[in-house]
Amino acid sequence: MRCKVGPAWLWSKSAMLLCFSLSASAHAAEPLRVVLEVSPPHQTLDNGKVGGLTTTVVEAMLQHAGLTPVYEVYPWARAFRIAATTPDVLIYNMARTPDREAQFEWIGIVNSYKFGFVKLRERKDIKVGQLADIKRYVIGAQRDDFSAEWLRDVAKQPPNKLELQPDVIETWRMLVNGKLELMIDDPQAIDDMLVKYNLAHSDVEFVIFPKELEQRTWIALKKGSDPKLVQRLRAAYQQVESSLELKK
């Protein structure tokens, strides 16, 4: 098993590196550095093991490519900065936005999201009938996430009404604790957060789904990465493109 050794990563702003190997059975495969955030159910971290729906697809692709992932789990902003500045580092479940288009080699689609604004149902004072209404409320998003960029640059959310967090877990914590009035998420991806914060589906309500927040997310590497590695990964992705893992 390959794993870089470092201090344990805690859910805090002083988060440090954790990294993990796929399994001892993959010892003959070449290692590949992989950065990601925790974003259940697609990327999870349970008892020191990286998993999740999207991770299953990535691992199937890497197995076809003869590579084994060496995971590094960070808040999204740090994972993105590493992938954007370091060749031959894979990142996954990333939105393909116009600003990022020329920065990365895009390997393949791993997920589709329909993001909307969610609030606690008990907050009857929060009323959103159209997109312009969101400017009245404090909204949470993840730092350097496409949704944060959209809120700032397209929706023109006032800076004093935008709270950026290191990860989706912290954003949900602030929503539950009343420090946020709205946040952005996908209704198909919130079950783990509801369990974590002892909520039922009936405790939350999605109030609006802007068309611009419908996204497909990708596996990617920095532009300028080894062309042979990029070709190898694209060929491996084609082998799993119609697989059961990806269809899930």
Image: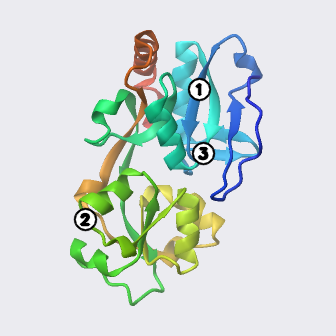
Q: Which mark is residue 74?
A: 3
Q: Viewed as shown, does residue 18 lie left or right of 83?
A: right
Q: Earlier in the sequence, mark 2 or mark 3?
A: 3
Amino acid type, mark 1 = Arg
The residue beneath circle 1 is: 33
The residue beneath circle 2 is: 155
Amino acid type, mark 3 = Tyr
Q: What is the quadrant of residue 43 in the picture?
A: top right
Question: How many marks can you see?
Answer: 3
Q: Are there few (<14), some (14-19), or many (20+) residues within 10 Å of tag 3?
A: many
Question: What's the CA distance linking mark 1 and mark 2?
Answer: 35 Å
The residue at the point 66 percent across, 39 percent down is 50
Answer above or below: position of 150 versus 25.
below
From this viewpoint, is residue 206 visible?
no
Residue at disc 1, secondary structure: strand
- Residue 211 drawn at (x, y percent): 23, 57
Question: What's the CA distance linking mark 1 and mark 3?
Answer: 13 Å
The residue at the point 56 percent across, 51 percent down is 40
Q: Viewed as shown, does residue 241 lie left or right of 101?
A: right
Residue at disc 2, secondary structure: loop
Q: Earlier in the sequence, mark 1 or mark 3?
A: 1
Amino acid type, mark 2 = Ala
- Residue 205 drawn at (x, y percent): 42, 74
Q: Earlier in the sequence, mark 1 or mark 2?
A: 1
